[in-house]
Image (spheres, rainbow, N blue to C red):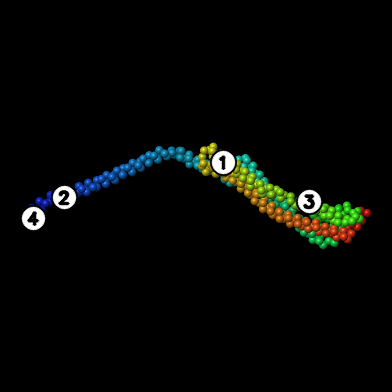
Amino acid sequence: MNMIDTDDRFQPSKMHHYLSRWVLIMAMLLPILAHSSTSTAALTGKEELVDEQLKVRAPPSSKLAALQKSKPLALTHDLSPRGMFHSADWVVKTVMLGLAIASLLTWSVLLAKSFELVPLKRLLKNSLNHLNTAHSLNDAKNNPDINGAAREFIAAAEAELRLSKDLTKHEDGKTGIKERVASSVSRVHVTSSRNMLTGTGLLATVGSVAPFVGLFGTVWGIMNSFIGIAQANTTNLAVVAPGIAEALLATALGLVAAIPAVVIYNHFTRQIASAKALSSDNAAAVLRLVSRDLDRGINLQVVRRKMG
């Protein structure tokens, strides 16, 4: 009985102890729960505020569609060489056309001079071989395989011998005749060399001037591009790029015209130098024939016979 009474007496105190612990735990948890609910409410409020701002800032569907349609229009520039040429300023177009004509003339000179110099060198080599085997000027004149500049050298020598037929009586007459024949032949050689240079001046001009002409077109085009930027009040690449590309096309055409012109000019310089050397060898061969004939007295006898 006593044990039962003792347990019954302490039972309410235990219940009170447990309840006090639960109250303490709940008191500790309530601030945490309150803070989490406040954070959740704040996040929810922020999300609602962001949604409202997006709704306010978002353009209407019609405006959005108009913007989407306007974007491709800003990029509809034809950036091919032909398109850039047609959309360029008239000054840049003039520069491009001039450079294109210069490039066409350069290739025309290449074809024309190639057809001129290759047969000329072959003819000079053939004539030189026959002049070196001739015994006299008369033999060289009667040789049908000697043509071109060599034939002109022979004609000039004979003309001077004909004019000097009465000077052999004077002392050192043959020496004077040789000098005058050499002078006549040299003038023919100079004329022949000058004819070989025809067309090379154009190549030199295009090679030296074309890059600067293209640069002028580029400067003019970029200047117009900056003016367009100032008027449009924008630095959008879609607005700036086409004008700059058109300007740079002028420089590209200048280089396209100049680089082949310089290469072709150097090529023909070597070819003409070789042809001039062959022409000079032909002139020297004719002078040797005249000198031999004068020492033998053959040519003057032939000239006297013709004049008589």
Asked whether the beta carbons under mark 2 and mark 1 sit within 8 Å of each other, the answer is: no
The 10 Å Cα crowd at callout 1, few under 14, some 14 to 19, many 20 or more, is: many
Q: Which residue is mark 4?
A: 3
Query: Where, by quadrant of the figure, is residue 77 drawn?
Result: top right
Query: Where, by quadrant of the figure, is residue 275 drawn?
Result: bottom right
The 10 Å Cα crowd at callout 2, few under 14, some 14 to 19, many 20 or more, is: few
The circle drawn on residue 191 is: 3
- Horizontally, residue 272 falls left or right of residue 237, namely right
The circle drawn on residue 182 is: none
Whether residue 3 appears in this view of the structure is: yes
Find residue 255 and report its horizontal and vertical position in percent: 63, 49
Q: Which residue is mark 1?
A: 225
Q: Amino acid under label 1? A: Ser
**Label 4, label 1: how far apart the Cα atoms are:** 109 Å
Asked whether the beta carbons under mark 3 and mark 1 sit within 8 Å of each other, the answer is: no
Question: Which residue is at 87% across, 58% downward?
Answer: 294
**Label 2, label 3: how far apart the Cα atoms are:** 134 Å
Question: Which residue is at 83% across, 52% downward?
Answer: 184
The 10 Å Cα crowd at callout 4, few under 14, some 14 to 19, many 20 or more, is: few
